[in-house]
Amino acid sequence: MEAQKEALQRIISTLAHKNDEIQNFIETLNHTLKGVQANSSSVIAELDEEFDGLYSILDEMKESMTTSIKQEQAHKTQELQNQLSQCNHALENSEELLEFATRSLDIKDSEEFSKAARQIKDRVTMAPAFRLSLKPKVSDNMTHLMVDFSQETRMLQALKFLPVPRAPEIVLADCMVADNCVTVSWQMPEEDNKIDHYVLEYRKTNFDGLPRVKDERCWEIIDYIKGTEYILSGLRFDSKYMNFRVRACNKAVAGDYSDPVTLETKALTFNLDGSSSHLNLKVEDSYVEWDSTGGKSQENKIKGKENKGSGQISLLKNSTSGTPSPKRSSVSSRSPLIRGSRDRFTGESYTVLGDTTIENGQHYWEVKAQKDCKSYSVGVAYKSMGKFDQLGKTNTSWCVHINNWLQTTFAAKHNNKAKTLDATVPDRIGIYCDFDGGQLSFYNASSKQLLYTFKTKFTQPLLPGFMVWCGGLTLTTGLQVPTAVRTMQKSENGLSGSASSLTNVAQ
């Protein structure tokens, strides 16, 4: 009976998997069908546009050639008419002289005859008829009529569709993920000098298999890439993977997509846990701000409205101003054991923790403070940190603390011990946590200058911790450990002298 149930269960699982594959294929076919219809209409429109452009060029050429022929006709007509006019004038003059010479033959007086003969001789010498060129200045052949369209005719008769480019191949060995940038490299399976540009598409996903037609995120498009490599920079890695595919395009058509590839883009992503933060803090997903109107006077009201099962807090009105206080975040699906499972910070512990635990691995995040922030701390803490405890003043928390009240101080704190840091407070602080290696380091996020390193042994899961008074902090997560930080961590041998005074084994 049990064996049959197991066999039936395997059959059910196989059928369910096959049904999922068929459903995905049906969606692919529907998507392709829509693409065929859309692309055919687009190609016809582009073909009409190309032929309209060709007709327009031919019309322009015809008009230009017609103008040239008319100009040549006008020039030759003018030349021939001028020459004809000169010939008529010369002929009239010559006929008149011929008549005069004929009459002179009848003169009997020798003296008169000699005088007339001399006049005839002089006039013949100067006669226009003897200075004329009896050859037309221009021919009746039209130079611009000598047009041979045979080559163009053969070219038009040979006109055909451009071939569809073949699908490129993404070279996985040349693809790289580092510093929240992704380098994607590809090549054509064979040389194609008709390629005009490439189109790269990508999307984030938490599914590690081949891309599916239906996914939680749509494809993002980067068009008109001239080379065979592209670097996507400034990404936030808030998913475990990214899918990539590329297609080649010539002047007329785009080819098929390459086989998609999936690259791992895992990084620590978390928000602030507003359900347990101090009442004087306004907390959003990645921003916390001091709010002097929060106050202890609301604590009892809020406690009465808390849902102990989910840790959700209703929107409350301020008892003094009548304006609503910020809505507290609901339970995080990523870490249900954190929200609502600890007391809210109170007293002078103006603290908020992250909503995701760190239990292994190497992680990095950054924090930026408002310019006018009076006092703040950033670091990590155990979940067991008491509701009255302050970051760095217990053996369950580690931080750097910046105090801008009256004068600026910058110190590393742990177990109520402080080490003054001889460094300028940066605009953004980078926090690097190597849980397994027992190391917590703070960096200038812009220059990657090391500010301080704690070396210890973490015995419990960690939570990112933040304290702020009179100001606000902005959190940036989804960041990989920067290459510069990894390099610096590898080159370190033990602790630096500045960290030795606060080194301990955490209990």
Image: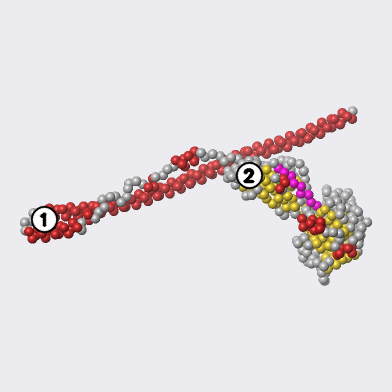
User: In front here: 367 or 83?
Assistant: 83
User: Which residue: 22% across, 54% down?
Assistant: 130
Helix, strand or loop at label 1? It is helix
* Badge number at residue 104: 1
Q: Are marks 2 and 1 in contact (CB under 8 Å)?
A: no
Where is residue 378 drawn, in percent x and y? 83, 60
**Quick check: can you spot residue 390?**
no
* Badge number at residue 297: none
Where is residue 505 drawn, in percent x and y? 92, 58
User: Which residue: 90% across, 56% down?
Assistant: 457
Amino acid under disc 2: Ala
Q: Which residues are magenta?
A: 260-268
Choose the circle earlier in sequence order: 2 or 1. 1
Helix, strand or loop at label 2? It is strand
* Badge number at residue 248: 2
User: Which residue: 90% across, 58% down?
Assistant: 396
Quadrant assignment for the C terminus? bottom right
